Image (cartoon, coloured by chain):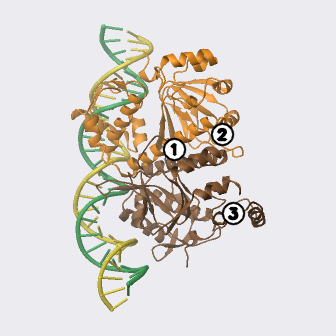
Chain colours: A brown, B orange, C yellow, D green
Amino acid sequence: MPRFWHRSLGVTGMSDASISSQIRTAQEPELCANCNIRHSSLCGALSSEEINDLNNIARRKTLDPGQPHVMEGDASRDFANVTSGVAKLVRGAEDGRSQIVGLLFPSDFICGSLGTSKPKSAPHSIEAVSALELCIFPHMQFEELLHDHPSLEFKLLNRTLDELQIARDWMVLLGRKTAEERVANFFLYVTQKMATLGCQGQTSFDLPLGRADIADYIGLTLETVSRQITRLKKDGVIAFEGTKHLVHVDEEELTRRAGF
Amino acid sequence: MPRFWHRSLGVTGMSDASISSQIRTAQEPELCANCNIRHSSLCGALSSEEINDLNNIARRKTLDPGQPHVMEGDASRDFANVTSGVAKLVRGAEDGRSQIVGLLFPSDFICGSLGTSKPKSAPHSIEAVSALELCIFPHMQFEELLHDHPSLEFKLLNRTLDELQIARDWMVLLGRKTAEERVANFFLYVTQKMATLGCQGQTSFDLPLGRADIADYIGLTLETVSRQITRLKKDGVIAFEGTKHLVHVDEEELTRRAGF
DNA sequence: CGGAAGCTTGAATATGCTCAACACGGGTGG
DNA sequence: CCACCCGTGTTGAGCATATTCAAGCTTCCG
């Protein structure tokens, strides 16, 4: 049984009827027409005609859980959509410490470095957390498309600003919150993300991350994370089936415990 | 005597001669022609003719140290350049905890929320750290300019991506570094920033932040910051005149102590 | 059913925090 | 010119929170 974040994500602000008519009239490429993130991703900025340009340079890639897409320091500058699965952005040190600086869900975008001259190395690695599917666009061609399609560039700017906001929110968590607040925040974030991904009404789902990854995301040790989760379970704020499958989340109480 | 970050920042990649000729032929507005961040800021994306559009909507604003430009939760959506001084982006809580999520130096840009429909409230306050001068652009008009001048939008996108990278680097510091590493990183960051701002060879400068602000920036208490600074002084890694004026920075040793 | 990976729990420890006193320095007023 | 004051920075002692290290326990898979 596929995990729910592999399922179709639905379409925002557009009825099924209008989509299929659009497909028929403009002959959208099949890959894009059937893509579950066609309208929720960056691609949503492009019309059925324009999407051809993107489709022409796209390449699909599948990764197993744990596999890296890009390693820290690599020269990779390509762009990509996450079409299904969850990925983590990680910065690590030799001594074992590592910090997750972002999670990517379906319809999220991986942005390479812009500008033609710089051969910057990747600032963090990108690794599959669950089975991952990417739709990759080579650097040069994508950047040209970006200049040719202002709507695409504008949407990318907007998304980057959103990401910046999320990163800064996380800075507050990492710099100023207690262990309990961090864990509560994490569960709130994941719960809300899952709801956004088109599974409204879904009362249960698998956690995308294991305890070690949660720890690396919220700047704690895995033991501390485990202890806090145990506490939340004992207090009835959350409930699991096994260690990954969440079956109950009291968002109100979580918000209270999340601080601020 | 003005502090050094109030001084002219010089021009990147363009000789003085070529600038003045440009001014003469294109009749750049006086305010912009004399602006010390004309070419290092976002404005650098615009030609002498184009800069008129920006100049027409610009409004200057001066703030004393400690004064807020925007308060957390305000409806302000305006854009602005920092022309001189240093500002901090702060997120705070009722209980006294607060976290600085970014510093703005001359030529840095304050980006309001994009898109016509959302009346989002400010996610963090913006406060003057030293005497601050802003060049403010009203939201509506600036966003129109953004659409009319692709080079401006592209530069903004690039800068936003840079900011995102900085925020993520800081997440690693806040999530995984020890007190000593955090303080060492802070001094490295400030030292390098000061060098970038056109004061190469400058071996001494005033710290832009007091101990309390440093603490809020690197996620510690001011006591811990003070203790770590004392240690660095005793070890001869840094040297002060008074409590704010740095006269010596051993960047190599700092890098060693910064971890990673 | 067995083995491995991931998770939980416990006890001891360390790192940074809290609270509190004191020092320094620049400005003001007697 | 000195005394005082206030904001800011330093130092100390005790404490709390999260870490470390270690053992045992589930859960998932073969």
Chain letter of the residue carrying label 2: B
Instruction: Find residue A249 and report its horizontal and vertical position in percent.
Output: 55, 68
Query: Up-down: is A208 above or below A153?
Result: below
Q: Which residue is mark 3?
A: A11
Q: Are marks 1 and 2 on the same chain?
A: no
Does residue B239 lie above or below A24 as drawn?
above
Q: Secondary structure at mark 2?
A: loop
Which element carries disc 1, helix, strand or loop? loop
Task: Give the amino acid at mark 2.
Answer: Ala
Residue name at image x 61 percent, y 34 percent: B79
- Name the residue at 59% across, 21% down: B32
Relative side of B184 to A33, left or right: left
Image location (x, y in percent) of residue A70: 43, 57
Residue designated by label 1: A114
Q: Nearer the viewer, residue A72 or B119?
A: A72
At label 1, the amino acid type is: Leu
Label 1 chain ID: A
Q: Please state the horizontal and vertical placement of residue B111, each as a whole percent of the image.
A: 59, 38
Residue C23 vertical position relative to residue B215 in the rendered view, above or below: above
- Sequence-earlier tag: 3 or 1: 3
Residue A178: mark in rendering: none
Can you identify the residue that label 2 sits on? B75
CA gap between label 1 and label 2 equals 32 Å
In the image: residue A220, left or right of residue B44: left
Rounded to the nearest angstrom, the CA distance separating label 3 from label 1 is: 29 Å
